[in-house]
Amino acid sequence: MHPILDEKRLLAFDLDGTLVDSVPDLAVAVSKALREQALPEPQEEEVRDWVGNGSWVLMERALNWALGKTPTPGQCEQGHRDFLYHYGFAPFARTLLYPGVKTTLDALARLPLHLVLVTNKPERFIEPILTHFDLAEHFSLCLGGDSLSRKKPDPLPLTHCAEHFGILPAQSLMIGDSRHDIAAGKAAGFATLAVPYGYNHGQPIRLSEPDVVLDSLEQLLSPVPHATRTA
């Protein structure tokens, strides 16, 4: 196994941009929500830069783009409601599992580790997506952006997971693709590992200075480091 796993007992994974590429489905739901307000619809690549802070902020950014100005609270409320409605119909129709994810999680699940999922996506969408990709049984705890009073980049979801299993932060690792994942991990006292292929608002993830960057999660299974430590 990769040295970053030495003495670790808890691995916390982000979902969107780390395990799955969900932007194709998110973009469809965003477009349908904007259509409800007779507003322009974005390209998928534009939506890709809006993902990472939960569904409310996603729609707030989409409305700001479509209107060319700050949306009103009423527009945000309607947009968010319509987005949840449309996304709920097909949260995994176009979503793809990143290469190596299933192999890696299968292998890690056989080790004496607690695997948890910590995402800013609404909790109701987690189980359908994990079940679709046959990953639900890999995680002993899943938290969405609305599961607790605060979400990433706040450290609360991560400290909650560590406390739930009675594991020290120093024995824990946050694995994600965005600056919010890395900030949450650092604030919680977790080691941090980043993948560069996800959603980070167009910024290189190395700027967030995670402890390790891996090109693929599959590299976690190799004892030879394939990555550059950034701190």
Image (spheres, helix red, strand yellow):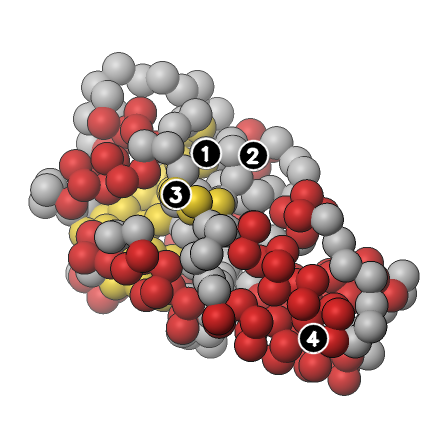
Going by the numbered disc 3, the residue's amino acid type is: Leu
What SS does tag 3 mark? strand
What amino acid is found at the position of numbered circle 2 in the picture? Ile
Q: Is residue 214 left or right of residue 205?
A: left
Crowd band around label 1 with a 10 angstrom C-alpha radius: few (<14), some (14–19), many (20+): many
Q: Nearer the viewer, mark 2 or mark 4?
A: 4
Label 1 is placed on what type of residue?
Val
Depth check, mark 3 against mark 1: the one in front is: 3
SS under mark 2: helix
Q: Which residue is mark 2?
A: 205
Q: Residue furthest right?
A: 68
Work out how far the residue at label 3 is from the one at label 2, CA to CA, in angstroms: 20 Å
- In this rendered view, identify the residue nearer to me: 74 or 39: 39
Label whose residue precedes the other's in the sequence (4 or 1): 4
Q: Secondary structure at mark 1?
A: loop
- The circle on residue 79 is 4
Reply above or below: 230 against 138.
above
- Figure check: 111 above or below 88: above
- Rendered image: mark on residue 195: 1
The mark nearer the N terminus, 4 or 3, is 4
Task: Give the mark toward the camera: 3 or 2.
Answer: 3
Q: Quadrant of residue 81?
A: bottom right
Q: Residue at x 66, y 36 (%)?
A: 203
Towards the viewer: 196 or 38: 38
